[in-house]
Image (cartoon, rainbow, N blue to C red):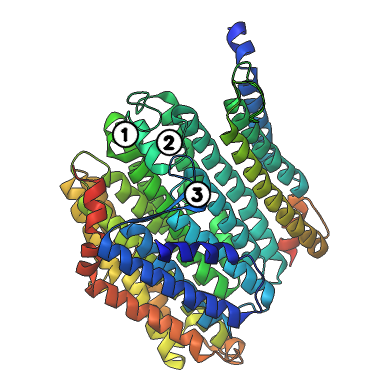
């Protein structure tokens, strides 16, 4: 309890303007330390609940830290602190950037820890506003345009989520996640009997999924995402690609699994198939669009669409009647792995772009020889994205495939294989450029003048991400052990 | 049918506002009007929450008022959501000012033309 109480003023106190990198680093490391202590406490002694302002649960707002939430908080603070090592030389500078950065960190931490549906909306919007501002940090005019596009689409998405929350509130009369779940099941503070089949509840589910799906950038709602990722400064796209989509997907997972629960999907099986269908379409469309991109940042952005699609499809599998232990574990592991790998890849692409002025795949020729360390790290991360065994990408996909077979949805297992092949198709293009394709004679003059110096910190971030990718892959069993109490609680069936 | 509409006219208004706002945000070629559309869309949701809170014959939720009170929780929510909406609008307008300075236009089609020419 005191640990969490200490997190709260820190999270709220972040709105104060900093004096740049130093403050951000101190706060980042302090935040990481707190998240670590919190994780240690939760993994040791079970979930912690903190009531904000001392109001008891159904009335006041609570922060809930269970195994999943604190692992995600750990991921958020670790990645955010790592990004600081990159932005010191490479990213946007100045106190305004760092104060928005801290605001983003506050929003993300809030999203991971909140136990209240409306509070989630508020943190979603804090995250959103900070992200729009960060994307516009690049002085190019197209960055402002991309940020505005994201702002319009993202706000409409968040408002859709709010409509869903309103419908759920109309049905149950409460906003606390645990209480809504209990009320839907017939108990809780509503006590209106089982509400699963009610049109209000089903419509609420639809609005919530549509709203969060926009924030995650699932296929038909993804149009803002490639522009936003590609136009943002390199340091920002690292941060945004690694964390913003991930926490939105985590919020969806939390609402689907913890608020609607497995019983809702037993009563309304169409809702489950809708999740699986949206996810699957996202996987195929995202991969196909990624394979035809010529600029590495857009390629990675479309690849995110497909990977989040897989996570959502796996969540859909997990809430089915056939027992979803492994599918949910796979979804969570893949969420983590994807965050680390995609963050590392965006940082790596940023390093290559800075060092060799290479913003197109054509300019990547022979970079493997001239910048061996970042190129090797990018290759390792790319292979991790494909799912080559010792990496975390493999562990996540393996669990999802096993879970899909176990739950009797072999389509999703097939999807995993298809996705692996498509991912290989676009990752192989990058690696081929880096190592095999010789530099064309004409382009040589164009790119050889290239580049500003990169700092050790920038390269170190990319290498660290590659090491973590492989390390987490080897530690897959430990992750499962940490998450087991949470998983058994929600998908016992 | 008409009675049902009379009893639920608030929700009818909300639905119409939602549609108008969303259509404006999607279809209007002017960036400022897009943002106004988003605002309209948000306002519709605020009204939806307020309509939810209403209790037949209820008074404003102040302790000294007579007994049936309107539910205070949605009103608190709307207050928070309005603040969020204002922040989003301010940021959006700031971005629009920057776009106007750099492209010299507020229309999406003109901006697109300028981009292609560059």
Q: Secondary structure at mark 3?
A: helix
Is A445 rendered above or below residue B50? below
The residue shown at (43%, 62%) is: A4
The residue shown at (64%, 35%) is: B46
The residue shown at (43%, 81%) is: A462
In the current view of this chain or complex, which residue is farthest to the left? Answer: A406
Q: From the top left corner, tell me how far across and down residue A136 is, in percent.
A: 67, 65
Mark 1 near mark 2, Cβ–Cβ under 8 Å? yes
Q: Is residue A396 visible?
A: no
Residue annotated with mark 2 = A205
Q: Is residue B46 left or right of residue A418?
A: right
Give A124 or B53, whichever is nearer the viewer: B53
Residue annotated with mark 1 = A264
Residue annotated with mark 3 = A120
Disc 1 to disc 2, C-alpha distance: 10 Å
Q: From the top left corner, tell me how far across and down residue A454 is, in percent.
A: 55, 89
Q: Is residue A192 left or right of residue A326?
A: right
| Foreground tag (1 vs 3) | 3
Badge 1 or badge 3: first in the primary sequence: 3
Give B92 or A21, whichever is nearer the viewer: A21
In the current view of this chain or complex, which residue is farthest to the front? Answer: B64
Q: Secondary structure at mark 1?
A: helix
């Amino acid at each position: 309890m005191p640990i969490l109480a200490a997190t709260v003023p820190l999270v709220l106190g972040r709105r104060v303007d900093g004096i740049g990198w130093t403050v951000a680093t101190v706060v980042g490391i302090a935040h990481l330390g707190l998240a670590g202590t919190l994780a240690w406490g939760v993994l040791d002694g079970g979930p912690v609940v903190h009531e904000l302002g001392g109001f008891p649960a159904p009335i006041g707002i609570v922060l809930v830290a269970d195994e999943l939430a604190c692992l995600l908080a750990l991921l958020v603070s670790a990645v955010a602190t790592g990004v600081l090592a990159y932005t010191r030389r490479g990213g946007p500078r100045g106190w305004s950037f760092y104060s928005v950065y801290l605001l983003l960190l506050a929003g993300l931490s809030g999203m991971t820890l909140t136990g209240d549906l409306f509070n989630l909306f508020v943190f979603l919007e804090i995250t959103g506003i900070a992200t729009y501002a960060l994307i516009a940090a690049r002085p190019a005019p197209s960055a402002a345009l991309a940020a505005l596009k994201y702002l319009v689409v993202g706000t409409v998405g968040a408002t859709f989520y709010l409509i869903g929350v309103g419908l759920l509130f109309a049905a149950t009369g409460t906003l606390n996640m645990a209480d809504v779940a209990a009320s839907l099941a017939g108990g809780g503070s509503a006590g209106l009997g089982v509400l699963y089949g009610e049109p209000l509840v089903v419509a609420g589910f639809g609005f919530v999924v549509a709203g969060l799906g926009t924030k995650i950038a699932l296929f038909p709602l993804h149009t803002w995402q490639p522009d936003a990722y590609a136009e943002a400064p390199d340091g920002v796209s690292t941060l945004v690609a690694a964390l913003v989509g991930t926490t939105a997907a985590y919020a969806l997972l939390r609402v689907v699994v913890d608020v609607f629960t497995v019983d809702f999907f037993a009563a309304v099986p169409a809702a489950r198939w809708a999740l699986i269908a949206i996810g699957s379409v996202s996987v195929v469309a995202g991969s196909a669009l990624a394979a035809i991109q010529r600029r590495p940042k857009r390629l990675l952005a479309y690849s995110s669409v497909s990977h989040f699609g897989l996570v959502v499809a796996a969540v859909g599998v997990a809430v089915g009647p056939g027992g979803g232990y492994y599918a949910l574990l796979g979804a969570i592991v893949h969420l983590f792995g994807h965050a680390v790998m995609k963050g590392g890849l965006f940082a790596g692409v940023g390093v290559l772009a800075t060092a060799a002025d290479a913003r197109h795949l054509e300019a990547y020729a022979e970079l493997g020889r001239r910048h061996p360390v970042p190129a090797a790290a990018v290759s390792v991360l790319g292979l991790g994205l494909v799912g080559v065994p010792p990496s975390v990408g493999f562990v996540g996909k393996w669990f999802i495939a096993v879970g899909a077979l176990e739950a009797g949805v072999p389509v999703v297992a097939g999807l995993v294989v298809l996705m692996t092949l498509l991912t290989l198709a676009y990752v192989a293009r990058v690696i081929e450029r880096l190592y095999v394709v010789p530099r064309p004679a004409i382009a040589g003059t164009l790119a050889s003048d290239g580049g500003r110096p990169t700092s050790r910190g920038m390269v170190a971030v990319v290498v660290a991400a590659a090491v973590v990718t492989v390390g987490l892959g080897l530690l897959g069993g430990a992750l499962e052990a940490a998450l087991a109490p949470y998983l058994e609680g929600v998908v016992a069936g | 049918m008409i009675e049902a509409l009379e009893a639920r006219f608030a929700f009818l208004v909300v639905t119409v506002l939602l549609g108008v706002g969303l259509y404006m945000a999607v279809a209007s070629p002017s960036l400022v009007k897009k943002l106004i559309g988003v605002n309209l869309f948000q306002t519709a949701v605020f009204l939806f929450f307020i309509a939810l809170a209403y209790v037949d014959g209820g008074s404003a939720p102040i302790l000294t008022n007579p007994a049936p009170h309107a539910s205070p929780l949605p009103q608190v929510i709307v207050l928070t959501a309005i603040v969020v909406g204002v922040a989003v609008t301010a940021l959006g307008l700031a971005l629009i000012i920057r776009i106007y300075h750099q492209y010299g236009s507020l229309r999406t089609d003109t901006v697109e033309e300028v981009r292609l020419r560059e």
